[in-house]
Image (cartoon, rainbow, N blue to C red):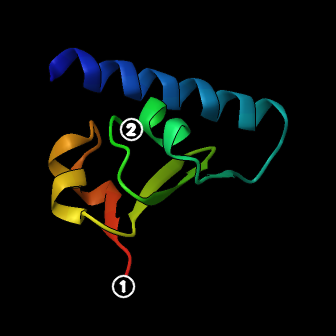
Amino acid sequence: MGNSTTRHEERIRQLQEVLRERRLAGTLLFYSRDILYFTGTAQPAYFVVMPNDYRLFVRRGYEFARTECGLEAERVIPES
């Protein structure tokens, strides 16, 4: 999954750049297609992106999302 990880990270970096340019604190994505585009998983989740950080909060299917998505494990959080 080396190429997909790079592709997702580049998409996130581009979004973060837009946030910085517009001086926004962050964005919350909850639509499954948006989450799939940025992370590589469509599990029920919320994706929070800030200018210098991002986290995926998984509502269901945490283990599957963690292995399926292209994010580092510490950025994928199970929602209790």
Three-letter amino acid code at the position of disc 1: Ser
- Residue 18 is situated, as x and y percent measured from the top left of the image, at 73, 29
Circle 2/circle 1 CB separation < 8 Å: no
Residue reaching furthest to the bottom: 80
Give percent across and percent down for residue 61.
25, 63
Within the image, what quadrant is residue 10 found in?
A: top left
Is 56 in front, or is 30? 30
Q: Residue at x 63, y 44 (%)?
A: 51
Rendered position, 40 above or below 46 = above
Query: Which residue lies most toward the top here?
Result: 3
- Residue plotted at (59% across, 23% down): 14
Q: Is residue 17 left or right of residue 21?
A: left
Q: Is residue 54 above or below residue 80?
A: above
Residue 18's place in the image compared with 26, above or below, is above
Q: CA distance from mark 2 to mark 1?
A: 20 Å
Q: What residue did someone put label 1 on?
A: 80
SS class, disc 2: helix
Residue placed farthest to the right in the image? Answer: 22
Q: Position of residue 29 (x, y in %)?
A: 61, 50
Which sits in the foreground, 40 or 17?
A: 40
Which numbered disc covers residue 24?
Answer: none
The x, y position of residue 47, in whole percent, is: 51, 53
Q: Nearer the viewer, residue 25 or 60?
A: 60
Look at the numbered disc 1 and give the secondary structure of its residue: loop
**Residue count near mark 2 (Cα–Cα under 10 Å), binned few <14, some 14–19, many ≥20:** many
Looking at the rendered structure, the kind of residue marked 2 is Thr
The number of numbered discs placed on residues in the rendered structure image is 2
Residue located beneath label 2 in the image: 39
